[in-house]
Image (cartoon, helix red, strand yellow):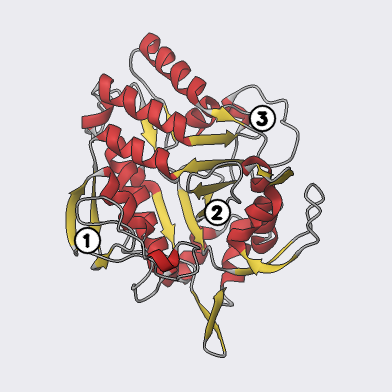
Amino acid sequence: MAKSGKRRAPLWARLSAIFGCVLMVVAGGAIVAQQVLVSRYAGAIETQNLLGAPAANAAKASDIKGPLNILLVGIDPRSDEQTPLSDSIIVAHIPKDMKQAYLFSVPRDLVVDIPPFEKTGFKGGRSKINAAMGYGSAVGNGKHDVVQGFELLAKTVGQLTGIPKFDAGAIINFNGFKAIVEAMGGVTMTIDQNVKSEHLQPNGKPRPRLSRCADNSCAHPYYGPQAEYKKGTYHLQAWQALDYVRQRYGLPRGDYDRQRHQQQFIKAMAKQALGKDVVTNPAKLDKVLKAAGKALIFDGGGHDVVDWAFSMKNIRSDDMTLIKLPGSSIIDNGRYRGEELDATAKDFFASVRQDTVQDFVFRNPEYINNNAA
């Protein structure tokens, strides 16, 4: 960090991670090179109307003012003939001063009321929240559209939290995450508990599947050696990092542990993307930005990704507070039915709507994910 009174070393491009380094922040440096890089990056991003509302007639970054709420959804790659599921759901809350970000994960198995959706004829019902994208995605002839599905998921998360509308949204493909980490040369992160992989072998190749589980009827269809991740700080290859944050089986807190690991991953990516090894290496930075662009479908509510980047240029990885929502499993006659949140979550959601999250976490420090450094 620059000493007081001296100009901070210029960063002609910085990649900030709100759910995995997908919104670029640009500040200082050589303006010509900066403009070229921004243009290339912005052009690589697919922009869609994710939130179901017409784009606003907004023209400049100064129009983006806090408080802001951004919905970020991670999906596994699927064809348009497969029903999409939202494997990770994260809300980023940016307070009015635009100097900090609070990120909280919504458990994918959280049982909620999913509202009706006219576009698909879905009548509404109670189900796990990760099904909302699927209920909203059908476009006929056996085809599915994740963009349309995002709209119903946004309505569902909005109904859960009481957030009347999201200011921006993004879909991030997990294969795109892998490409970002590969472009950075891996990621250094702290593993806080021993984890065995359900999906991959120690060499990174998929574990074989039992033949009797070909119809996906088995809860645990894999067999053979498992990749292992032990407590400590390691520099992980891309496949290792992504495999680690996917795991939930065998963990004491299941999906809550996985949410924490995903948040740790986000913060680790942010820290590394803003490090000198990336921002002062034009070739590596260019690869990272292009990989991030390909990983993302973005709706900026009428603003493009460059406007958003400039508006949040003061938010760094250390300015991210990661929130853990308390909850527990629903067990009915010995069968797992999903997750439910603690009653205090309603008070947290109210603090998001009222932009008083800082006060809430001061009074309720157990909501801060202290293991996400």
Disc 1 marks a residue whose amino acid type is: Tyr
Q: Earlier in the sequence, mark 2 or mark 3?
A: 2
Q: Residue at x 39, y 12 (%)?
A: 31
Residue at 24% x, 63% y is 226
Q: Which residue is mark 1?
A: 229
Image quarter hosting the C terminus: bottom left
- Residue farthest along the bottom direction in this orientation: 333
* Mark 1 surroundings within 10 Å by alpha-carbon count, few (fewer than 14), some (14 through 19), many (20 or more): many
Residue in the picture at 71% in, 31% down: 55
* 92 with respect to 258 (left or right): right
**Cα distance between the residues tagged 1 and 3:** 42 Å
| Horizontal side of residue 238 vs 294, given as left or right | left
* Structural distance between the alpha carbons of marks 2 and 3: 24 Å
Quadrant where the N terminus sits is top left
Q: Earlier in the sequence, mark 2 or mark 1?
A: 2
Q: Looking at the rendering, which quadrant does residue 250 occupy?
A: bottom left
Residue 302 image label: 3
212 or 108, which is in the foreground? 212
**Is the residue marked by circle 2 packed among few (<14), some (14-19), or many (20+) residues within 10 Å?**
many
- Tag 3: amino acid: Gly
Is residue 112 positioned above or below 13 on the image?
below
